[in-house]
């Protein structure tokens, strides 16, 4: 036991000389002098010795324990003193802590939601894995419509009882329109920010997984003027400037009349540039007055109520707002890109 005590003493003193951090001296103290420490274990074994040997070993053990304690305290004071000496300015700031950054898509989504909430709209959500009924049929899209083509839609490889593919990754956020009407009835106003999927080639302007915000407003005597007012307010708030919009005819099965919404180019101010193909206008998305068949699918009387709907890709809004040239950057997890926001 004498040899064990001397060995521990030499081992501890040698380790103390190499320590440079306070946490290390604390850990060493726990390892040797703690309740389950190496020296404590030896002291507990003294009871197995004879009286004379117990007296001698106890005296030696307490002496060594005291020396180790003194060495530890001296080292601790040395470490603390080193960091509070005049050679070190302890008031200097420490290492910079990196903080996270919001994706530009998240920034625009938050701004859109805050804007629509301030105008009395509900923020809605719906399933990304959608049924054929809600994604197409309830939106007045017949079986032979091009939107059902396999090259546009991700169909799930599972057939229903009729032997048809019944589940799809939603191609737009419009399915929530009918779900919302069935649940809340009319009058109603709500927006659906969410992800949609298209089976198409990815390039700087197109993604197979993209983000869209759907707006639905149903009440009595709703007209295209209401649609234009809400769209104009949304775009002006997002781009923090007054913007001019125009509407022109378009075709979408779930609205009648169908409309295309354009916005004056934010790059050239409507004068014409490469971004707007020298037209002075940028195409923003589809819109229109909700088709009577869609209102009926939502259990709403089209003879009493009317409504408008529009769907814009907020990826495009973010690209225009922040001057981003490649849509693929949003989902790239590129820290150099994200750290700018």
Image: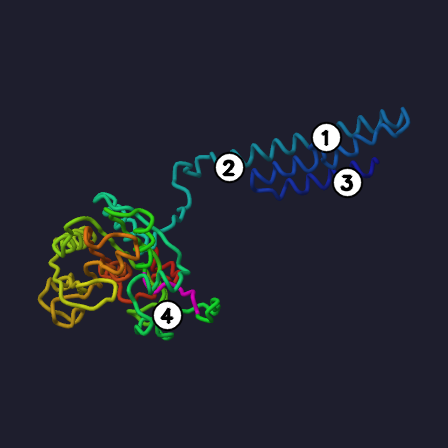
The location of residue 310, given as percent across then percent down, is 23, 58
Label 4 and label 3: CA atoms lie apart by 75 Å
At a point 30% along the width and 57% down the height, the residue shown is 297
Toward the left, the furthest residue is 271
Q: Tag on residue 188?
A: none
| Residue indicated by mark 4 | 153
At a point 44% along the width and 70% down the height, the residue shown is 164
Question: Viewer-proximal residue, 135 or 82?
Answer: 135
The location of residue 28, given as percent across then percent down, is 65, 38
Q: Nearer the viewer, mark 4 or mark 3?
A: 4
Q: Earlier in the sequence, mark 2 or mark 4?
A: 2
| Residue indicated by mark 2 | 82
Pointer 1 with pointer 2, Cβ within 8 A: no
| Residue indicated by mark 3 | 7
Does residue 340 show up?
no
Circle 2 crowding by C-alpha within 10 Å: few under 14, some 14–19, many from 20: few
Tell me if residue 210 comes above or below residue 221 in the rendering: below
Q: Which residues are magenta?
A: 165-172
Q: Quadrant of the N terminus?
A: top right
Tell me if residue 13 comes above or below residue 228 in the rendering: above
232 on left or right of 20: left
At a point 66% along the width and 35% down the height, the residue shown is 30
């Amino acid at each position: 036991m004498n040899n064990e005590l001397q060995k521990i003493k030499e081992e501890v003193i040698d380790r103390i000389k190499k320590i440079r951090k306070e946490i290390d001296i604390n850990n060493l103290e726990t390892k040797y002098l703690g309740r389950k420490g190496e020296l404590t274990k030896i002291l507990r074994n003294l009871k197995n010795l004879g009286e004379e040997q117990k007296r001698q070993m106890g005296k030696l053990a307490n002496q060594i324990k005291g020396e180790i304690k003194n060495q530890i305290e001296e080292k601790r004071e040395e470490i603390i003193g080193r960091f509070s000496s005049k050679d070190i300015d302890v008031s200097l700031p420490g290492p910079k802590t990196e903080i996270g950054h919001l994706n530009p898509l998240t920034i625009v989504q938050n701004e859109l939601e805050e804007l629509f909430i301030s105008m009395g709209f509900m923020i809605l959500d719906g399933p990304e894995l959608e049924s054929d009924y809600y994604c197409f049929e309830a939106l007045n899209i017949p079986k032979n419509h091009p939107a059902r083509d396999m090259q546009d839609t991700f169909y799930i490889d599972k057939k229903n009882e009729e032997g048809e593919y019944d589940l799809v990754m939603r191609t737009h956020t419009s399915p929530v329109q009918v779900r919302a009407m069935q649940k809340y009835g009319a009058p109603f106003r709500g927006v659906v920010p969410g992800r949609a999927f298209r089976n198409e080639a990815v390039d700087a302007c197109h993604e197979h997984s993209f983000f869209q915000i759907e707006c639905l407003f149903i009440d009595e005597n709703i007209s295209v003027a209401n649609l234009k007012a809400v769209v104009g307010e949304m775009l002006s708030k997002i781009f923090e400037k007054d913007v001019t919009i125009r509407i022109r005819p378009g075709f979408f099965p779930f609205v009648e009349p169908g409309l295309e919404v354009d916005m004056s180019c934010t790059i050239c101010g409507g004068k014409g540039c490469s971004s707007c193909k020298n037209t002075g206008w940028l195409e923003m998305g589809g819109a229109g007055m909700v088709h009577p068949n869609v209102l009926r699918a939502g259990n709403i009387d089209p003879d009493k109520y009317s409504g408008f709907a529009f769907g814009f890709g907020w990826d495009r809004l973010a690209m225009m707002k922040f001057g981003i040239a490649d849509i693929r950057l949003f989902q790239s997890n590129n820290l150099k890109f994200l750290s700018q926001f």
